[in-house]
Image (tube, rainbow, N blue to C red):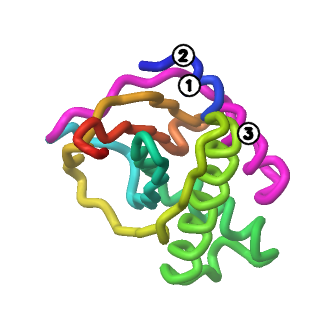
Amino acid sequence: MNPQCQTAMKDAIFRVLETMFFTTALFEDADEPTPGENLPYQYEARIDIHGDQKDISLFWLSSDRFARMITADFLGVSAEQLTLREIEDALKELANMVAGELASQLGEEVWRLSIPAFEELTTVSKQYPGRTMASIRLLDDDGPLALALCRRDDAAK
């Protein structure tokens, strides 16, 4: 893992969660999930960050509890009233904001963000392409909330 990227990613996540979603979480460095590993996450938002010299993918894996909490805070509604579409939109927006904040910290290179994607996850984790630059788990007293992975695509450019 890249220590600078790990620090930049934590900072980006902290800023976005605090200013846009009115929440905070504890952070810990995390191991890369392995294919077939049973993870406590139900949703994934992904966004690609394209630069002149490299491409980076940001994966945001979220538990249902965390997804509902941040979506409800963002929209100002009860977590029980949320639709899957509202959760999808909030997680895609979270990925977009974290990617934008991260890109602003990655140096002078011009960065372009793709349109975020979303999917509901099965109980089996998939393979995440590229080389790990950062892997951060968010948690609270009740357990894991989310896992953020930043991957560099070495095949690009």
Q: Amino acid at mark 2?
A: Pro
Mark 2 vs mark 3, foreground winner is 2
Of callouts 2 and 3, which one flags the residue occurring earlier in the amino acid sequence?
Answer: 2
List the residue tagged with mark 2: 3
Circle 1/circle 2 CB separation < 8 Å: yes
How far from the left and from the top, in percent, is residue 83?
Answer: 54, 83
Magenta stretch bounds: 10-35
Residue lying at 57% horizontally and 76% vertically, measured from the top left: 89
Secondary structure category for the residue under label 2:
helix
Left or right: residue 35 versus residue 60 is left
Task: Give the alpha-carbon distance from disc 1 to disc 2, as whole Å.
Answer: 5 Å
Which residue sits furthest top?
Answer: 3
List the residue tagged with mark 1: 6
How far from the left and from the top, in percent, is residue 2?
Answer: 47, 19
Residue lying at 51% horizontally and 83% vertically, measured from the top left: 85
93 above or below 75?
above
How far from the left and from the top, in percent, is residue 49?
Answer: 48, 52
Quadrant showing the C terminus: top left
Quadrant showing the N terminus: top left
List the residue tagged with mark 3: 14
Q: Look at the image and say whether residue 84 sits in the magenta stretch.
A: no
Secondary structure category for the residue under label 1:
helix
